[in-house]
Amino acid sequence: MTTPLLEIDDVSVSFDGFFALTDFSLRLMPGELRSVIGPNGAGKTTFLDVITGKVKPLKGSVTFRGETLVGLSEHKISQLGIGRKFQTPRVFENLEVIRNLELAASPSKGPFALLTQGIPSRVRDEVQRLLDYVGLGPYAKVQAGSLSHGQKQWLAIAMLVAQSPQVLLLDEPVAGLTDEETVRTAELIKSLAGDHTVLVIEHDMEFIRDLNASVTVLHQGSVLTEGSLDEVQNDPRVIEVYLGQAED
Amino acid sequence: MKNFKRLLPWILLAIAFFILPAILDDFRLNLFGRYFSLAITALAIDLIWGYTGLLSLGQGIFFSLGGYAVAMHLMLNTKSEAGGNGIPKFFENYGVDQLPFFWQPFWSPMSTLILLWLVPAVVAGLVGYLIFRNRIKGVYFSIITQAALMVFYHFFNGQQKLINGTNGLKTSTTEIFGQLVGSPDLQGWFYRITVLLLPLAFLACRYFTSGRFGDALIAIRDDEVRLRFTGFNTVPYKTIVFIVAGLLCGVSGALYTVQSGIVSPQYMTIAMSIEMVIWVAVGGRGTLVGPIIGAVLVNYLRSLVSEALPEMWLFVQGALFIFVVVLMPDGIYGWFTKGGFTRLLAAFGLAPRTATYPQLDLEVAPASEGRVISND
Amino acid sequence: MELFFSQILDGVSIGSVLLVSATGLAIVFGLMGVINLAHGEFMMLGAYVTFVVQSIFKPMGGVLFELYFPIALVAAFVVTALVGVLLERTLIRQLYGRPLETLLATWGVSLIMVQLIRSVTTAMIAAIVAGVLLGLLAVRFLAARFAEYPFFPYLRGVVWAAALGVGLAINGALASVRPLASAWFGPRNIDVTAPKWLQGSWGKIAGIELPGIRIFIILLSVALLLAMLWFLRKSVWGLRMRAVTQNRQMSNCLGIPTDRVDSITFGIGSGLAGVAGVGITLLGSVGPNLGAAYIVSCFMVIVLGGVGNLTGTVIASLLLGILQSVIGSGSILIAFPDLPASVKGVVEFFATTSMSLVLVFTFIIAFLQFRPNGMFPQKGRSVEV
């Protein structure tokens, strides 16, 4: 068995006494594609917050390639190779689409590099490829703020890919997308897995099925169960969490 | 048309450099010299507020530091100002017979020319780094910079023995090159220097706001948290622009001081620093032409109103603040470039009406979902 | 030692005034997200209301004059609260969700208020009333006819400009009439005398004099604080205010009149500033520029205490008041006369009002390096959105 790439071990997070995560553990293997589901308030976004350094856990450890992430700042964690897409598509509204991508793709993120150096042609090509892939080629010179919701979602995903992280954390990548867009997004994500390690949080069960990945179910801040989608869907505990106590 | 647009800056520069000195009397020319030096401060504020989203209410600190640097040099090197010990006369009033140590570097013109921008830049770097390191932003940033301003104001105001306290340092009666600083001849030269430095400041701001560094600044303004998750440490970016802005304010303050004839803690009042912000708001933030227009226009208006009805100026200024914030958030330049004038004509049936999207203010929360683009 | 304690008492009373004012500011800032830079001018307004009430009661003399102070307190609260409501209805309402914009706009308001107090005359009031009425009538008249047309907003602007012109003309015409054209207050400081029952000492505790003014201010602020707490926690409108703070849309859906809640919130915040202004008349000089001296301190109290935390506001304002008073008076030297010369020099260096502010503000900025969110930071996930 290979060693896990990202390991969250026994993490608890409390907001003013309310435990958003309790003794939460999760492992991601290199190249794995994993989807995470769970009802509202299960702690899905919070554990992304913990991994990416936005929230400091009360206890527990997060290690990435054997390096601990707890206490590192967001940009350091991002530079180590962990990228994140937020629940709402957050793009830089007053920058052109292509500038959004170039910023994300920039190999060096320091101020002096940005002042003095241009973008390597390799990166420029990559940006162009991504633009075309997500169908935003014609909109390269449009301000990101005037894109439609779906286009913003894709731009946000494209920016994440442009960062070329090892681990991609996607928080609701298909919320508000049309069916056709959802299918395309699933294809994109599947094509990323293998080279990258991908974790997807979604509510859309069709999409999860499309992804055909192992599923982790969260409930009240801990892992309820893991398995394939069919296994999970037939698990009485999962049904109870989603539908309430069965009448008997 | 395109040629004209490219030539326009040169034409304006030529007018400012050659024609204005020829047609204006000494008094008016001096006023314009002051406006142009204030325009440099406006550019600096635009750099940090318009582009990076940091509304500093403490730029008066850096402005005054630049002004004091020049004033101290002039004081030291003027024979008529010297008292018993060869140090400026005002010290005698407070029984001080030894020059405070921090005056020493200002004997030399060379080190003064360096310190007048270096000191503001260093102070800005220090203050900025401390604030940004703690992720203080938004209104908190404004409040803290205001508090920092008050620290400097009360210090300069309270220290007669060190820096002549509330009286400030008068430069108009000092001498340089054997001439009175207040003389029309020298004032003409100060005007010309200002006219040449303003475009340089403009180019400096353009260097920082165009290109990828500028993209990062706008990204910080739009969504700093997102940028951090993209792998950018935003602290050095913000510190650098704050330093640049402090430096520009220092230069601006030095130029203003020699042309206004005095530097005093009055330049560090809250009122002065917020007024600087309104120049940018009136002209149009987030553009580089706007602040220059705003600074010149507002200060020209100020001169006009103050000459005619001095007690009206605060009314006018207050109304200006409210008007710009509520009705013209893009400023004059932004209003024009975003089609405000065409809309005005269209409203009266003088131009065809175009279906424009309502322009969103930059500070407003991102647009809600579902806006469909109709470019195709 | 007695002197040292009386210095601290001084500090506590200054802190109490700050507390009342800062509570008002904190309510407006914390509940509505509005940075009200005109808050200091509302304090100034309260002080001027005190002056007016005093001037009305002065001719009556005797016991009636002694009673003017409580009346001034109520009057100051009512007047400033009404001005606050007016401001909220006309200006602040358009700027919700844009704190930096409210900051700039309210600064504009503060400039206008300062100049208004300096140069207000009967003629000017008449001109303003006439101008506003004329503008309102003209706009209403034109709206009936042209409201549908795209140029209506511009037309409205022209009408208001014309109304302004008419107002200026009326002011100019009336200015030649002497009694109408003399300034009510003028740019200089005004004189407010405390009633006799406040002056002098209210007795002694352990050898320390209890000056009536100081004790009164401290009691007043405690009473106001308790009233505020009761209002926010127990009253219907307090409940509504808290509801709107937490979720404006939801409150709207539940039938809470959110715009009236906004007006009331802003009115109370301003009213508290007005009452603080009454307190200031007992402590120091009163002039048109009074606001500028206190506004930064009020904001510092909020930042130091932690936004939205009443305990923090109380501790921070008392701390600020005491530090300012003790450092500024240099009374540490009297309390501890045996300090080494070097320390003495430092204490003397900061023993002026100006320099004590330098030290106190520097201390606060330094403190924020270790606790960026103040002494009592808000917790939870809503902090950094």
Image: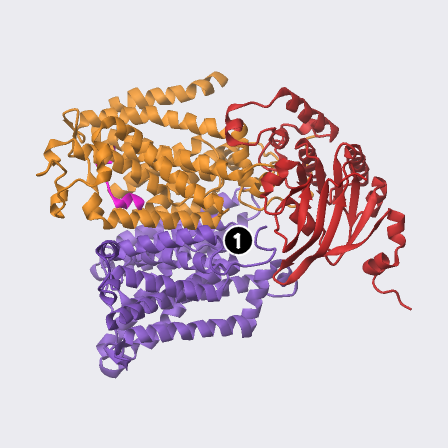
Mark 1 is on which residue type?
A: Tyr
Residue at 46% x, 33% y: name it. B333
- Is B92 displayed left or right of C368 in the figure? left
Q: Is residue C255 above or below residue B114?
A: below
**How does the figure colour the protein chain or chains?**
by chain
Q: Is residue B275 above or below residue B194?
A: below
Relative depth, front residue between C105 and B242: B242
Relative depth, front residue between B327 and C95: C95
* Chain in red in the render: A
* Chain in orange in the render: B
Relative depth, front residue between B60 and B82: B82
Q: What are the residue bounds of the magenta stretch? A: B259-268
* Chain in purple in the render: C
- Is B142 displayed left or right of B108 in the figure? right
Residue B90 position by quadrant: top left
Residue C259 position by quadrant: bottom right
Residue at 71% x, 25% y: name it. A129
Residue C119: image location, x then y, percent = 27, 56
- Is C85 displayed left or right of C183 in the figure? right
Residue C314 position by quadrant: bottom left
Quickly name the residue at label 1: C96
Residue at 88% x, 64% y: name it. A246
Q: Is residue C258 magenta?
A: no
Q: Residue furthest top?
A: B3
- Kindly state the secondary structure of the residue where label 1 is placed: loop
Label 1: how many Cα within 10 Å (few below 14, some 14–19, many 20+): some
Kindly identify which chain the residue marked by label 1 belongs to. C
